[in-house]
């Protein structure tokens, strides 16, 4: 640094003043604000008022704070500059101001050190990542931030994803904030559009057609689903649909049958259960029309058994005794055996029967064989007093004490042995082998009642006690004409449904008069092995106190008439016509011709069965699997059936449950009928 000669004295004086202070490491208050004392600039007024020059005043020469003030012309910059200026002097002027000496590593020389002091941006005060530029100011600085940064020093990243003015950064799905910026991304199953903000769903079903294998691929936002039909579950390993075994999940209360794509619940109708409305649980088949089932132990029910006899008595009386039988009789049946008596050696026998509603007498002994039918018709459901008495030369038959027949006979009906007349008497049936001995065969089964009997003039001694012990031998107090199915068994028939005019064809024309007491049960069915190729049934409707009429082939419903009021004291008439091509169902309410989509397929199943062997059942089904038909409960109520023009007589059935009454039906309870 060049120093003018005129100022050397002053400089030396300053050094003399400063050296003692440096030894003390502190400046006095006076010297802290005035480092050098110098003369006025050329002693000129203009020199004093001229703005100072940093290079000339503080580098080439030494300046005090006042001179520095002249350079910056403001206090903030002066206050900022001057302490740092002293630091530069301490670093580059040996022996001066050691207390404020700065590191020499920052600047290479005094000039660089001093000229850098006024620049507030050196060293850089701004965040290097976030600033764009630094603007020097008066003892301060301003950091100009890059987009995405904020703060005095651009030290804070702006989270564009949370900008309320630009929700989610303008991204349609995911906004990812990054230092000084952000980017949009998409969820799995979506791809980014060219605008780098919006996402669009990837249609996996189109991109990868075989992604679901044999299942149906359904595209959904961001993903896809492999769908199977109801009752099937998708196997992602095999990429196929597998049947769901719902039965393994205990879906049904009693019996569950699984099949591909579904399942069905069944209840044991033979035990009085039906499927509830939820199609899973079972409930008791309710009685919808209560009947008067009151019985009287003094009334002997002649139709207690389908096969055999109801009651057997043996008499051993004095040889002067003659055969006699007196009783009150009630029936709607037209034919059957009332009483059969025979000698112990079977050589003589005597029959009281009913044929075409009239009394018939047949007898045979060693002297004669005779058969006589006569008198008025008595199968009117009323009580009729019948009297058959052996006289000396004839047999007298009276009805209501009025003689209707008088049959000649040469000798006694039964021959005494050892002074006694020994006979066996059978009610409502014939003993074994007796049917072959009759003069004119007759079906022995008879649905009727007897009361007030007197046999062989012995009164009712011993008989009442036998009847009183067994409820099934008791007759109903009041009955009406018809056949009664109590919901506990079936009647079996063997019927040929072949069409006479065409051996290859068949037809089923059924006419039914029904008065059900329960709203669920099988009325008419054709059975082949363990299958039911055809059935006509009732089932309780979803509507309260109403019933549906079902026509089914195997376990499929072909036709349904819904919500019919059947449980009433009035009979309901049904007509059914079925052949290999058509199905018709007639009721007083409507005529139904099935419109099932599977009509021809189901009729083909029926046609195949009809070309084989089918068995006809009334009132229910035999012991076959529950799943063979939609309904398996026994029918409960009164019913008369006509098939192809022939009225079915339950007495003519191949077999019949003993509780089924062929020609008598209980009356409806009076209080129920009124309601």
Image (cartoon, rainbow, N blue to C red):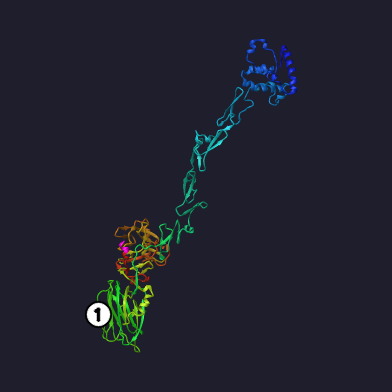
Q: Residue furthest bottom?
A: 418
Left or right of 213 on screen, residue 94: right
Q: Choose top left, top right, bottom left or bottom right for residue 288.
A: bottom left
Q: Nearer the viewer, residue 37 or 546?
A: 37
Left or right of 300 on screen, residue 49: right
Rendered location of residue 508, percent (x, y): 33, 64
Q: Choose top left, top right, bottom left or bottom right for residue 450.
A: bottom left
**Rendered view: 358 above or below 32:** below
Q: Which residue is mark 1?
A: 405
Q: Residue furthest front?
A: 29
Q: Which quadrant of the figure contains the C terminus?
A: bottom left
Rendered location of residue 641, percent (x, y): 32, 66
| Residue 11 falls within the magenta-colored stretch | no
- 10 Å neighbourhood of mark 1: few (<14), some, or many (≥20)? many
Rendered location of residue 622, percent (x, y): 40, 67
Rendered location of residue 37, percent (x, y): 70, 15
Instruction: Give the residues in magenta.
Output: 671-675
Q: Nearer the viewer, residue 121 or 197?
A: 121
**Rendered view: 430 above or below 552:** below
Q: Which quadrant of the figure contains the N terminus?
A: top right
Which SS type dominates the magenta stretch? helix
Q: Is residue 508 visible?
A: no
**Rendered view: 137 above or below 528:** above
Instruction: Label 1, secondary structure: give it.
Output: strand
Q: Choose top left, top right, bottom left or bottom right for residue 155.
A: top right
Q: Is residue 181 visible?
A: yes
């Amino acid at each position: 640094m060049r120093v003018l000669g005129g100022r050397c004295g002053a400089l030396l004086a300053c050094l003399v003043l400063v050296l003692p202070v440096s030894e003390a490491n502190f400046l006095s208050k006076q010297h802290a604000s005035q480092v050098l004392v110098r003369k006025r600039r050329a002693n000129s007024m203009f020199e004093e008022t001229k703005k100072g020059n940093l290079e000339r005043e503080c580098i080439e020469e030494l300046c005090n704070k006042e001179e520095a003030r002249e350079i910056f012309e403001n206090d903030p910059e002066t206050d900022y500059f001057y302490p740092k200026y002293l630091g530069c002097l301490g670093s580059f002027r040996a022996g001066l101001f050691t207390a404020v000496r700065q590191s020499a590593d920052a600047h290479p020389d005094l000039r660089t050190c001093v000229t850098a002091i006024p620049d507030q941006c050196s060293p850089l005060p701004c965040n290097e990542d976030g600033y764009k530029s630094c603007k020097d100011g008066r003892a301060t600085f301003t950091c100009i931030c890059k987009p995405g940064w904020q703060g005095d020093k651009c030290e804070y990243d702006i989270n564009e994803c949370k900008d309320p003015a630009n929700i989610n950064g303008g991204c349609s799905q995911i906004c990812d904030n990054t230092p000084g910026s952000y980017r949009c991304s998409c969820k799995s199953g979506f791809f980014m559009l060219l605008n780098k903000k919006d996402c669009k769903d990837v249609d996996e079903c189109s991109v990868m057609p075989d992604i679901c294998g044999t299942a149906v691929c359904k595209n959904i936002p961001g993903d896809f689903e492999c769908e199977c039909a109801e009752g099937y579950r998708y196997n992602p390993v095999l990429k196929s649909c597998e049947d769901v075994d719902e039965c393994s999940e205990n879906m049904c209360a009693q019996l569950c049958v699984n099949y591909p794509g579904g399942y069905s619940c069944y209840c044991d109708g033979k035990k009085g259960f039906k499927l509830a409305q939820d199609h899973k649980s079972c409930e008791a088949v309710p009685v919808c029309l209560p009947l008067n089932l009151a019985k009287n132990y003094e009334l002997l029910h002649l139709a207690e058994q389908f096969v055999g006899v109801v009651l057997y008595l043996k008499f051993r009386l004095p040889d002067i005794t003659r055969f006699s039988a007196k009783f009150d009789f009630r029936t709607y049946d037209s034919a059957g055996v009332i009483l059969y008596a025979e000698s112990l050696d079977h050589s003589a026998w005597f029959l009281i029967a009913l044929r075409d509603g009239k009394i018939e007498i047949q007898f045979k002994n060693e002297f004669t064989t005779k058969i006589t039918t006569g008198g008025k018709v008595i199968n009117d459901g009323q009580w009729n007093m019948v009297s058959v008495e052996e006289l000396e030369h004839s047999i007298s038959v009276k009805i209501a004490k009025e003689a209707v027949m008088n049959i000649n006979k040469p000798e006694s009906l039964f021959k005494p042995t050892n002074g006694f007349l020994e006979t066996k008497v059978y009610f409502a049936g014939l003993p074994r082998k007796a049917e072959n001995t009759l003069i004119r065969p007759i079906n022995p089964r008879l649905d009727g009642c007897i009361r007030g009997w007197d046999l062989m003039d012995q009164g009712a001694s011993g008989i009442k006690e036998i009847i009183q012990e067994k409820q099934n031998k008791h007759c109903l107090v009041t009955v009406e004409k018809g056949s009664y199915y109590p919901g506990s068994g079936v009647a079996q028939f063997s019927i040929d449904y072949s069409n006479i005019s065409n051996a290859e064809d068949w037809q089923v024309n059924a006419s039914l008069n029904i008065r059900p007491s329960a709203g669920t049960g099988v009325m008419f069915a054709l059975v082949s092995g363990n299958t039911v190729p055809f059935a006509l049934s009732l089932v309780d409707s979803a509507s309260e106190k109403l019933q549906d009429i079902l026509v089914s082939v195997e376990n499929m419903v072909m036709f349904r008439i819904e919500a019919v009021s059947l449980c009433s004291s009035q009979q309901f008439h049904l007509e059914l016509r079925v052949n290999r091509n058509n199905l018709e169902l007639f009721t007083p309410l409507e005529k139904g011709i099935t419109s099932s989509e599977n009509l021809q397929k189901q009729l083909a199943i029926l046609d195949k069965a009809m070309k084989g062997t089918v068995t006809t059942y009334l009132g229910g089904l035999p012991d076959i699997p529950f799943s063979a038909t939609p309904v398996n409960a026994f029918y409960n109520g009164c019913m008369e059936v006509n098939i192809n023009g022939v009225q079915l007589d339950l007495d003519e059935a191949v077999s019949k449950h003993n509780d089924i009454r062929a020609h008598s039906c209980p009356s409806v309870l009076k209080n129920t009928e009124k309601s």
